[in-house]
Amino acid sequence: MNSQVACLYCRSENAEGALVCASCGRDIAVPATLLAERDDLLRKREDLRDELKRARGEIEAIMRRGKSR
């Protein structure tokens, strides 16, 4: 079975594994290095969100202690 991939720009069908759209000529393949970089950035973003959540908790605890004095 021959799989097809739709171009994100013009929606034309292209053969799976095609690097550029046969209709509009735009890139349709995403380089593996770019995908790896994206995945790394997503992990870093999640780590930073966790760190921010912990910091907010610490700040709230400090604020509560300050109010009880």
Image (tube, grey):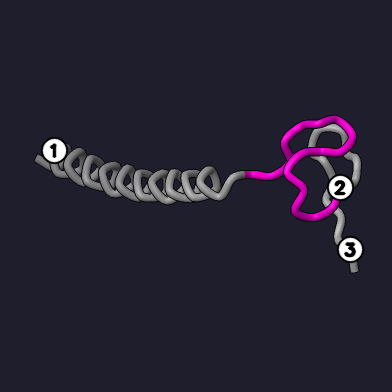
**Depth check: 21 or 37 in front?**
21
Report the mark closest to the observer, 3 or 1.
3
Q: Is residue 2 above or below residue 52?
A: below
Three-letter amino acid code of the residue under disc 2 = Asn
Q: CA distance from mark 2 to mark 1?
A: 63 Å
Image quadrant in which the N terminus is located: bottom right
Report helix, strand or loop for mark 2: strand
Residue position for label 2: 14
Tell me which segment is drawn in magenta: 15-30
Q: Sequence-wise, which precedes: disc 3 or disc 1?
A: 3
**Residue 12, percent across and down?**
90, 40
Q: Residue at x 35, y 44 (%)?
A: 48
Q: Is residue 53 left or right of residue 3?
A: left
Q: Residue at x 64, y 44 (%)?
A: 30
Q: Sequence-wise, which precedes: disc 3 or disc 2?
A: 3
State the mark number for residue 2.
3
Q: Residue at x 85, y 52 (%)?
A: 15
Q: Main SS type for the magenta part?
A: loop
Report helix, strand or loop for mark 3: loop
Residue position for label 1: 66
Q: Sequence-wise, which precedes: disc 2 or disc 1?
A: 2
Three-letter amino acid code of the residue under disc 3 = Asn
